[in-house]
Image (cartoon, rainbow, N blue to C red):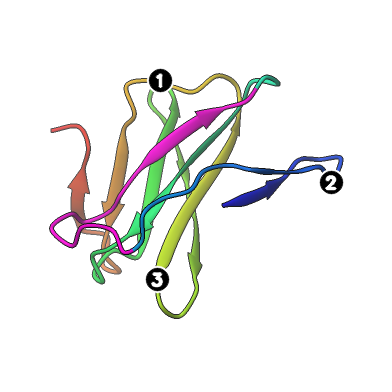
């Protein structure tokens, strides 16, 4: 993953093994940079998932940008502030059904 900041500077956000294990609905990771900007990202493996939300502060969720390469789908949320832990990600179907949540 290559990413640009507001000034156009590029850096590698992360790399991952591809293809990801198929027994998962999605993969996830988070990264906080020195400017206290957080990135939450991963690969969507379950074809029923059409929406991802990430908790970026207490009880506040942001909808992820979904990137479809034609061969794989990924998601990304960029948020101002420190990485919010524990990481809570929710995945939904087109009908709005909760398919998966990292918090049970």
| Residue sitting farthest toward the front | 17
Helix, strand or loop at disc 3? Answer: loop
Mark 1 or 3: in front is 3
Q: Is residue 88 above or below residue 27?
A: above
Q: Which range of residues does the magenta coloring cover?
A: 19-33
The span from disc 1 to disc 3 (Cα, nearest Å) is: 30 Å
The span from disc 2 to disc 3 (Cα, nearest Å) is: 26 Å
Q: Which quadrant of the view contains residue 19?
A: bottom left
Residue 72 numbered mark, or none: 3
Q: Is residue 41 above or below residue 39?
A: below
**Residue 78 point in image, percent of width and height:** 58, 40
- The residue shown at (21%, 42%) is 101
Along the line of sight, the residue nearer the viewer: 92 or 31: 31
Mark 2 or 1: in front is 2
Q: Which residue is mark 1?
A: 58
Q: Is residue 72 left or right of residue 37?
A: left
For the C terminus, the image quarter is top left
- Categorize mark 3 by other alpha carbons within 10 Å: few (<14), some (14-19), many (20+): few
Sequence-wise first label, 2 or 1: 2
- The residue shown at (38%, 25%) is 59
Sequence-wise first label, 2 or 3: 2
Pointers 1 and 3 in contact (C-beta within 8 Å): no
Residue 8 numbered mark, or none: 2
**Residue 38 point in image, percent of width and height:** 56, 30
Q: Is residue 38 above or below residue 26?
A: above
Pointers 2 and 1 in contact (C-beta within 8 Å): no
**Residue 95 point in image, percent of width and height:** 26, 67
Along the line of sight, the residue nearer the viewer: 8 or 49: 8
């Amino acid at each position: 993953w290559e990413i640009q900041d507001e000034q156009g500077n590029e850096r590698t956000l992360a790399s991952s093994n591809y293809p990801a294990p198929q027994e998962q609905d999605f993969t996830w990771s988070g990264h906080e940079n020195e400017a206290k900007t957080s990135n939450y990202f991963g690969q969507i493996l379950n074809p029923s998932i059409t929406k991802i939300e990430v908790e970026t502060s207490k009880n506040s969720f942001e909808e992820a940008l979904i990137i479809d390469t034609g061969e794989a789908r990924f998601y990304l949320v960029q948020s101002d502030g420190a990485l919010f832990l524990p990481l809570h990600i929710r995945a939904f179907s087109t009908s709005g059904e909760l398919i998966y949540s990292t918090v049970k």
